[in-house]
Image: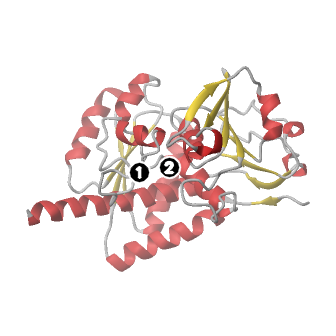
Amino acid sequence: MSCKTILASKVSASFRTQIKEDIKERNIRPKLVGFLANEDPAAIKYAEWTAKTCAETGVEFELRKATKLELEGKITEANEDKSVNGIMVYYPVFGGKQDLYLQSCVSELKDVEGLCHKFVHNVYHNIRFMDSTETMKCIIPCTPLACVKILEYIGVYNHVIPYGNRLYGRTIAVVNRSEIVGRPLAAMLANDGAKVYSIDVTGVQIFTRGSGIKLAAHQVEDTELTAEQVIPQCDVVITGVPTPNYKLSTSLLKDGVIAINFSSFKNFEDDVKTRASIYVPSVGKVTVAMLERNLLRLHDYQNDLTEKKENC
C-alpha cells in the first residue's frame, strides 16, 4: 500500500504534551464547563471524551446538565462566574437560528469553541486578532482548527510562503457546509490562499481570495458545478457528512489525494487507500486538544485583563 494512514492521536500528541507541561509548570488549573441540554448519543460521547482528556492534561472539567429552557440562564451564570475560564455547549439544542443565538450568549472571553458572533465574524473576514494591539489571537472553532493543524502536520501548508498565504496553489474540497464546521473551515482554508470547493446537498460554492490571492479575505461564488465535476480536481478532500449512508466514491478521487474525514461516520469508501496518498479517518482527538489549547489562551487573556484593571 502506498497510502499512509495518519491517526488523530499522533497529530494531537505534541499539543497535549505541551498543554500538560504548561499546566504543571505554571501550577494552574483552568476550568472548563460543558453544558448538555440534549440526549444526543454523539454529544454524550463527546462530553465523556472531553472529561477523560481534561483529567489527563490537568484541566478541571465540569459537565452541567440543563433543560433547553434553563440553558440560556445557566450560560449567563457561567459568564459571570470568575472561577470558570471556558464554556462550551453540546449542540444541537434547538437547532437552527435558536442555536446560533445561544452561541452568541457565551462571552467571547470564555468561548472555547469560537462560535460567538465576534469570532465567527472574524473568521469570515480574515481578522486574526481580537483587538487592534494584536496581542490576543482570535479563538478559532475547534474542529475546523483541528483540520488546519492536521494539514499543517502532513505538509499541505507550504512554510516557504509567507504566513497567511501558505495554501496558495492548493485545491481543496470540503464536503459539508454546516455553520459549525464546514463553512468556517472552507473560509479559513480560502483565507490561507487555497481554492476551496464547498459542497453540500444544495450544490457547489467556490471560496477563494481571488486571482493571485489579491483579496484581504475570501469571497464566495455560487456555481452550477457538481461534486462529480470538482472532486477529481482536488489535492485534498475533507468530508464531514453526518450520516452513515453517505459514501464518497473512490472513483472520483485523483491519484495521490489527501483524504480527511471529520464526520463521526466513515464518509469514504473502504478502498479509499487505493487512490489516497494520505488518509486521516477521524479528527476527534485533535479537536479536543484544540479545545484545551483555546481554554489556556482564554485563561491567560482573563488573567491579563484582570491585572490591567488592578494596575489602573
Q: Is residue 178 visible?
A: yes
What residue is at 44 percent from the left and 59 percent from the top? Answer: 292
Question: Quick check: 126 left or right of 63?
Answer: right
Q: Is residue 184 left or right of residue 111?
A: right
Instruction: Please name the residue that numbered disc 2 is placed on.
Output: 142
Q: Residue furthest left?
A: 312
Q: Residues within 10 Å of mark 1 (few under 14, many from 20)?
A: many
Taking depth in this image into account, of 286 and 212 the one nearest to the observer is: 212
Front of the two marks 2 and 1: 1
Query: Disc number at residue 139?
Result: 1
Residue 209: x, y in percent? Answer: 58, 40
On the rendered structure, is 35 left or right of 233?
A: left
The amino acid on which the numbered mark 1 sits, given as a three-letter code, is Ile
Mark 2: give few (<14), some (14-19) or many (20+) Cα within 10 Å: many
- Please tell me the numbered disc located at residue 229: none
Using the image, determine if residue 225 lies above or below residue 113. Answer: above
Give the residue type at disc 2. Answer: Cys
Colour mapping used in the image: secondary structure
Q: Decide which of 244, 207 is in the foreground and name it.
A: 207
Residue 81 x, y percent position in the rendering:
21, 50
Q: Name the element at disc 1.
A: loop
Cβ atoms at labels 2 and 1 below 8 Å apart? no
The residue furthest bottom is: 25
Residue 264 seen anywhere in this rendered image of the structure: no
Q: Nearer the viewer, residue 112 or 232?
A: 232
Residue 197 picture location, percent across and down? 68, 35
Q: Quadrant of the N terminus?
A: bottom right
Identified at 61% across, 48% down, the residue is: 193
Dot 2 falls on a residue whose secondary structure is: helix
